[in-house]
Image (spheres, grey):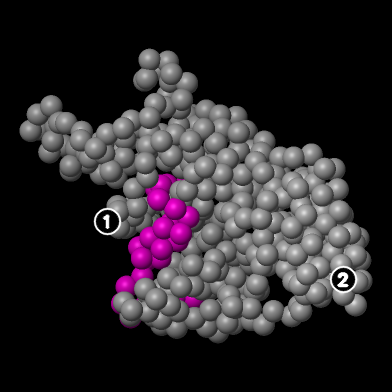
Amino acid sequence: MAEDRQHKTRTRLIHAGRTPHEFSGVVNTPVFHASTVLAPSLEAWRQVRSAPPPNYNEGIDAPITYGVSGTPTTYRLEAALCEIYKAGDVVMTSSGLSAITAGLLAVLKAGDHLLMTDTAYFPTRKFCEQVLAKFGVETTYYDPRIGAGIAGLMRPNTACVYTESPGSQTFEVQDIPAIAEVAHKAGAVVMMDNTWGTPLFCDPFALGVDIVNEAVTKYIGGHSDVIMGLLASTRDYSEQVRSTVRLHGHYVAPDDLYLAARGLRTMEIRLRQTGETGLALARWLEGRPEIECVLHPALESHPDHALWKRDFSGCSGLFSAVFKPVPDQALAAFYDGLTLFGMGASWGGFESLVKPTDITPERSATTWPHEGPIVRFYTGLEDPDDLIADVEAGLDRMRAIAAVAG
């Protein structure tokens, strides 16, 4: 759909990467279950294996060499996401975490220095400390609000600055253009986790990012039944990113790819609905006496609201609230009586979730200033009034138990 880039996002999401008449008019790209792909001749065998990497911006599919390398099920989804991200290339990975680790490994080598945001996904920290360190890569964690001040942490061997905006538990918005300017002057790559904003609400490449990772598990999949990641990159890094993903064996099963492609078609409508509901709940929570503060960058009260407004065109349904200190049994009364919010660690599906969050073990460069418990909320596609009523009943239970406990 390269010729239709003038169309609006919702239209592009419906049509990108689909070529029905190549598959007998079938609307969705079929699921190709294939390990072995035969070549009709020696010449064809040699041509396929010497072909350059795909250039989805020109509408070219990758050659099919072997099932794990991908089939039309893979390539059509990657092509669609490449168009939506306005990227040089997009490659699918087996999980959101594998997208992070493969992206880092694509640009780091022994002796390099990595700057990692202090809000990073906790398994990313473990990867830095238990894998990268073993291979001679040193990691320094930095305050996500450092902005251009990151210049003070750059070293001659700093090869990558990893960002996540906003942080997926405490929702600090990073000044990505300021960080990118400093990093690029020093010759470092900028990588960003864009799972919260998705390409629909944030264009990382316009902010100066070189490599983007996203958990397809979340909003692209959208139905809590897919585990997958993606790496989008500028053309300068596409070949080394794609080859690193393949060499580490991060292949994705065709049935999951099909589900992700299906989820992509309704992503914009779901994302906007969950975002509107989340913001409504966040505003309501700001008025509750049990709440110390609400961590949602689209709120005017958020310290990074101006940055969010500059870099994002919308918000997703994920945010946190800091509760005032309460006895543990009172907090349990809040969680355990919820009927519409499940307690789970993921998000991005059709159902609403809450997650008990402990920041202290996950910070080393910054100090968390709040004493009360943090509750991460994800609002799904339920009616906003019903979700607010469920949370209200939970807060009422919590307050009643707290009063009895003294």
- Residue 156's x, y, as percent? 41, 82
The three-letter code of the residue at mark 1 reads Leu
- Residue 90: say if magenta: yes
- Residue 158: say if magenta: no
- Residue 23's x, y, as percent? 37, 19
- Residue 386's x, y, as percent? 82, 43
Which residue in the structure is indicated by mark 2?
402
Task: Give residue 145's quadrant in the image.
Answer: bottom right
The three-letter code of the residue at mark 2 reads Ala
- Residue 194's x, y, as percent? 56, 55
Image mark for residue 212: none
149 in relation to 310, above or below: below
Q: Residues within 10 Å of mark 1 (few under 14, many from 20)?
A: few
**Magenta extent:** 86-115
Quarter of the image with the C terminus is bottom right
Q: Does residue 317 appear in the picture of this structure?
A: no
User: For the point 87% across and 71% down, which residue is it?
Assistant: 402
